[in-house]
């Protein structure tokens, strides 16, 4: 490669061809007329060395094949580390340890199962005996008999205008009755069939307070629970009222 110094700025112009009559300075952008005597030009070595010219130029197809060969060689180098000499050496030193360790595990396994292997038919018989199905005892669960019920009717009365929206029917707790015989109940619980309950109705028409005044305790409890669930029409101020519940057994006059 030929070069020449720029007479205007002194920069070295490396890209000078012997076929051209002019050279261009990339630094000061000057156009220089080359001398007729080409021997005055400076000879500079190639950056990549003189050996570059000695290498034969490859065709595009040959360059592609060469690149493919290098890529394949590099991939086999990094994908198979056991092919390295050092890896082969380390693996070769590790093989005896694997053989010894595997032999110990195999010997221990055979020794632990030698008894079961020799007596396998007997063990199968024992397993059949051990897993023989056993009939579980039959358990009879007793179903509690429901308490017999009594048939009764309830009517309610009170003084004042008819402003009740929803009436709750009293429900008697049969477990608290002394007897379920109607003749005995007529003489005890239903002897005084009227139960009076004093209630307080709020502005929303709901019963905020209920208290039994007279009657049997069993009937009192049923009447108070029913009175608390009764709903009246809304009003401007709370109102007190007395409800009278009349309990009648079926067939009672």
Image: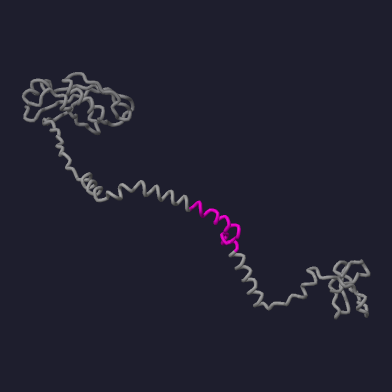
Q: What quarter of the picture does the N terminus occupy?
A: bottom right
Q: Would you place residue 136 above or below residue 189 in this image?
A: below
Q: Would you place residue 225 above or below residue 53 in this image?
A: above
Question: Is 134 on the left-hand or right-hand side of 5?
Answer: left
Taking depth in this image into account, of 223 and 62 the one nearest to the observer is 62
Q: Residue at x 53, y 53 (%)?
A: 94
Taking depth in this image into account, of 6 and 186 the one nearest to the observer is 6
> Colour scheme in the image?
one colour
Taking depth in this image into account, of 156 and 35 the one nearest to the observer is 35
Q: What quarter of the picture does the C terminus occupy?
A: top left
**Is residue 134 inside the magenta stretch?**
no
**Is residue 81 inside the magenta stretch?**
yes
Per the rendered image, the range of residues in magenta is: 77-98
Question: Is 97 on the left-hand or right-hand side of 181?
Answer: right
Question: Percent x, y for residue 18?
Answer: 86, 79
Quarter of the figure with residue 79: bottom right
Q: Residue at x 22, y 48 (%)?
A: 125
Question: Percent x, y for residue 13?
Answer: 87, 70
Q: Residue at x 18, y 24 (%)?
A: 244
Question: Is 130 on the left-hand or right-hand side of 32?
Answer: left
């Amino acid at each position: 490669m030929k070069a020449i110094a720029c007479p205007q700025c002194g920069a070295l112009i490396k890209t000078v061809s012997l076929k051209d009559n002019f050279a261009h300075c990339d630094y000061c952008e000057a156009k220089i007329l080359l001398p007729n005597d080409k021997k005055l030009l400076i000879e500079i070595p190639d950056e990549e060395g003189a050996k570059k010219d000695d290498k034969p130029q490859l065709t595009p197809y040959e360059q592609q094949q060469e690149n493919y060969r290098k890529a394949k060689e590099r991939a086999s180098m990094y994908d198979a580390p056991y092919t390295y000499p050092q890896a082969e050496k380390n693996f070769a030193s590790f093989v005896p340890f694997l053989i010894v360790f595997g032999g110990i595990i195999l010997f221990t396994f055979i020794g632990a199962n030698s008894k079961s292997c020799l007596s396998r038919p007997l063990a199968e018989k024992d397993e059949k005996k051990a897993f023989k199905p056993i009939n579980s005892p039959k358990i009879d669960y007793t179903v509690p008999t429901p308490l017999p019920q009594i048939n009764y009717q309830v009517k309610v009365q009170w003084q004042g205008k008819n402003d009740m929206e929803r009436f709750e029917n009293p429900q008697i707790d049969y477990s608290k009755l002394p007897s379920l015989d109607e003749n005995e109940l007529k003489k005890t619980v239903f002897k005084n069939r009227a139960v009076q309950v004093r209630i307080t109705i709020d502005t929303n028409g709901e019963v905020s307070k209920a208290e039994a005044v007279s009657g049997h305790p069993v009937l009192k409890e049923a009447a108070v629970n029913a009175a608390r669930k009764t709903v009246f029409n809304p009003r401007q101020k709370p109102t007190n009222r007395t409800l009278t519940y009349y309990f009648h057994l079926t067939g009672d006059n």
